[in-house]
Image (cartoon, helix red, strand yellow):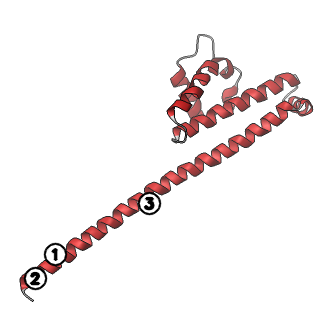
Amino acid sequence: MTTQARDGGRRLRHVAEFVTTLAVLVTLVLVALELRQNTGATQAAAYAQSMDALTDWRLAIASDPDLASVWSDYMGGAEPDDARLRLLINALWGIYENAYYSWRRGIMGESEWSRFERLICQRRDREFGLGITDLLTAEFIEYAESRCGPSPAGAP
């Protein structure tokens, strides 16, 4: 075998090694991206499941007058109907916040989200004034404030 043939063989092996290394790196990057997406989906599912359980709990109390009476006593003696209304409003805002995180993580599309956003902006001032923000994440509150514009004078 000539020197040229051996050099050509070595070059070919080096090119093959380079291509193989590059393929492995690309595969690792794709696997990392897939893991990241799966982690986000898992986090979104866990959050949604927690919010669903909390919403179910709120609705169970709000729909049972006896439980609502016990809850209102526990919460400081509010009228049972006021406590029931408060639980319903809390459940609704939990649904809004859950939808926000689904949209932000790319699980919910723009057209679906726009319906929620419109309702959030319509109800924000009145219900934020009821202290609902104590139950919401700072990120969601900041988003609502930035998208819905400033609160009218005198509103919280």
Residue at the (44%, 60%) spot, across then down? 31
The kind of secondary structure element at disc 1 is helix
Q: Could you tell me residue 102's position as x and y percent?
A: 57, 39
Provide the residue designation for mark 1. Answer: 11
Q: Amino acid at mark 3?
A: Val
Observer-side mark, 1 or 2, equals 2
| Label 1 Cα neighbours within 10 Å, binned few <14 / some 14-19 / many ≥20 | few
| Label 3 Cα neighbours within 10 Å, binned few <14 / some 14-19 / many ≥20 | few
Provide the residue designation for mark 2. Answer: 5
Q: Looking at the picture, does residue 34 appear above or below residue 138?
A: below
Q: Amino acid at mark 2?
A: Ala
As drawn, the label of residue 31 is 3
Observer-side mark, 2 or 3, equals 2
Marked residue nearer the N-terminal end (2 or 3): 2
Q: Looking at the picture, does residue 91 appear above or below residue 105?
A: above
Task: Give left or right: position of 24 versus 34.
Answer: left
